[in-house]
Amino acid sequence: MSFRSVIQEVKGEIGAISRRGFRSRPGRVRRVAAAAEEPPDESSAAALVMRESCWTQLPPELLREVLARVEESEGWWPRRRDVVACAGVCRSWRGIIREIVRTPEASGNLTFPISLKQPGPRDAPMKCFIVRNRTTQTYYLYIGLTDALTDDGKFLLAARKCRRTTCTEYLISLDMNDISKRTDSYVGKLRSNFLGTKFTVYDAHPPYAGDVISKGQSARVIGSNHLSPRIPAGNYPVSHISYELNVLGSRGPRRMHCAMDSIPVSAIEQGGTAPTQTEFPLSYHESFTSIPFFKSKSVRANNSTASLLTQNGSKLVLTNKSPRWHEHLQCWCLNFHGRVTVASVKNFQLVASDESNPTNQEHDDVILQFGKVGKDMFTMDYRYPISAFQAFAICLSSFDTKIACE
């Protein structure tokens, strides 16, 4: 029996439970006529059927072996959805799947939503693309299903541009139909200054285990009864992006500088590791019971980030790879290895630059690559040590209008 047949049979049993419970509901007339009869409890009936199901009686060792083979055999979307379906069968299946499925850094696969907050693969870049909707000012991130530049893809993240009086914000969400701060799908945002030369990436969740929002002198604690349980956990600055002033393009292409506040420079060294989120908070309401709010718009993270960077050295800094001037084409060129087909000021490649090095020598490995392939379509290829969320936020900064950088 194939695994797909197994999943369909389990779903069939669950559907039978639901139909049986629906049919067993007594009507109003029947309850009046036979008030002494106790209506059957749907939850107890469902639990009884699940206990009698053959799938719950499988030995844990056998179940683990079956799920491990399924996970290994389906390494790419859309077949990857069967792995997610396994995690939705029951609690025991979900626990085993979470143990078996590896992070994108080790497996090169994006399986669960938390994978978007984890560092990308080390060996090869994760090939994605961004679709822009000019009318609604929204941007959608997809992972490519093939090596082609354009395919249907699988949706990952969405962002919506919000213009403010003194800045511009890009709200990032897991839901392409509801991009708002007041939903559980909100994962972070990108905020710019008035000139569009400086950006800050905020994560709605702690960038690593143990990080909390600090209590500063300007903090005021608000009771949990004054808050909506659907408000995100907070703003954790994880990256700062700056563009050098370049009026009328007199100094060549754009020059980017990305300081990754949550990633130490030791992460790119041999044997180094980058902070990895393991799961989203179970409840935003629970996380708000001890989280203070500040009078300013931004929320400061505590000294744990600074202490982490102190222990591991300075923070990782990314700079755009310098293009070369092509005499025949009379333009600046970069080798995108066929992933970019349209010339644009937005195109860039980011590499690691050790600021502690007096020569400020660039590394050869491209960590993030972004470029135009159509009127409203762009490719985004990222790799370790940044995540899909961080890469998407950095690319969004390239879309924003820059008064003093063009």
Image: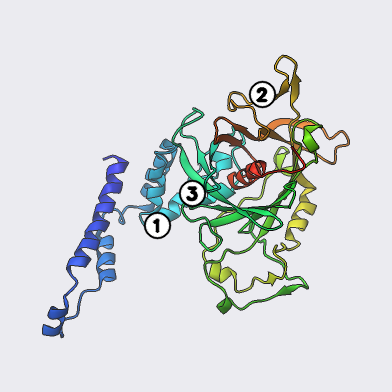
Are the residues tagged 1 and 3 within 8 Å (C-beta)?
A: no
323 lies above or below 108: above
Q: Quadrant of residue 319?
A: top right
Quote the CA–CA distance across marks 1 and 3: 17 Å
Where, by quadrant of the figure, is residue 317 drawn? top right
Q: Is residue 305 left or right of residue 6?
A: right
Place of residue 73 in the rendered image (x, y in percent of width and height, measured from the top left): 41, 36
> Tag 3 or tag 1, which sits nearer the N-term?
1
Q: Tell me the kind of residue under disc 1.
A: Ser
What secondary structure is found at the residue carrying circle 3? Answer: loop
Q: Position of residue 215 (x, y in %)?
A: 73, 71
Q: Which residue is mark 1?
A: 92
Which quadrant holds residue 228? bottom right
Could you say which disc has been placed on residue 335 in the image? 2
Amino acid type, residue under disc 3 in the picture: Phe
Q: Earlier in the sequence, mark 2 or mark 3?
A: 3
In the displayed orientation, state which residue is furthest to the right: 358
Of mark 2 and mark 1, the one earlier in the sequence is: 1
Whole-angstrom CA distance, mark 2 to mark 3, is 32 Å
Q: Are marks 2 and 1 in contact (CB under 8 Å)?
A: no
Q: In the rendered image, which quarter contains the N terminus?
A: top left
What element does badge 2 sit on? loop
Left or right relative to 362: residue 236: left
Q: Residue at x 73, y 52 (%)?
A: 193
